[in-house]
Amino acid sequence: MDSQLYIKNVVTLKYDSSKCNGCGLCVQVCPHGVFKMENKKALIINRDFCMECGACAMNCKEFAISVSKGVGCAAAVLNGFLRKAEPSCDCSSSCN
């Protein structure tokens, strides 16, 4: 999946695989394909794809994922403004 990278190595995304129950919701809700399922556990493909919308953490019932929601979304909205495009972080209602 082609994903937009934000600033390298600054994302607040944290994942504890020992808490993962293998439900796969993080894979389903992530707008940038940060996660994939392998051997009944979620894996992070590339942390730098994360835009910090918080959808993964909000849907993880096992609290295996945490992220400081909004940092990446703010950057995406600012980029949209600077490009004179519709400000959007691509995560629809997940960014509330």
Image (spheres, rainbow, N blue to C red):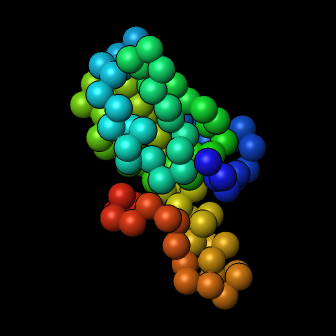
In the rendered view, tell whether residue 47 sits above or below residue 92.
Answer: above
In the rendered view, tell whether residue 4 sits above or below residue 79.
Answer: above
Query: Horizontally, is 18 left or right of 88 in the view?
Result: left
Q: Position of residue 42 (x, y in %)?
A: 44, 25
In the rendered view, tell whether residue 73 sits above or below residue 54.
Answer: below
**Picture quadrant where residue 61 is located:** top left
Quick one: 39 or 89, which is closer to the camera? 39
For the point 66% across and 42% down, the residue is 48
For the point 53% across and 61% down, the residue is 73
In the rendered view, tell whether residue 60 sits above or below residue 85.
Answer: above
Q: Position of residue 74 (x, y in %)?
A: 56, 64
For the point 54% across and 50% down, the residue is 32
Query: Horizontally, is 49 left or right of 32 in the view?
Result: right
**Picture quadrant where residue 28 is located:** top left
The number of numbered badges drawn on the structure is 0
Quick one: 79 or 20, which is closer to the camera? 20
Query: Horizontally, is 21 left or right of 78 in the view?
Result: left
Q: Position of residue 19 (x, y in %)?
A: 35, 16
> From where the camera sits, is residue 14 visible?
no
For the point 31% across and 34% down, the residue is 60
Q: Residue furthest left?
A: 61
Q: Position of residue 40 (x, y in %)?
A: 38, 17
> From where the camera sits, is residue 39 visible?
yes
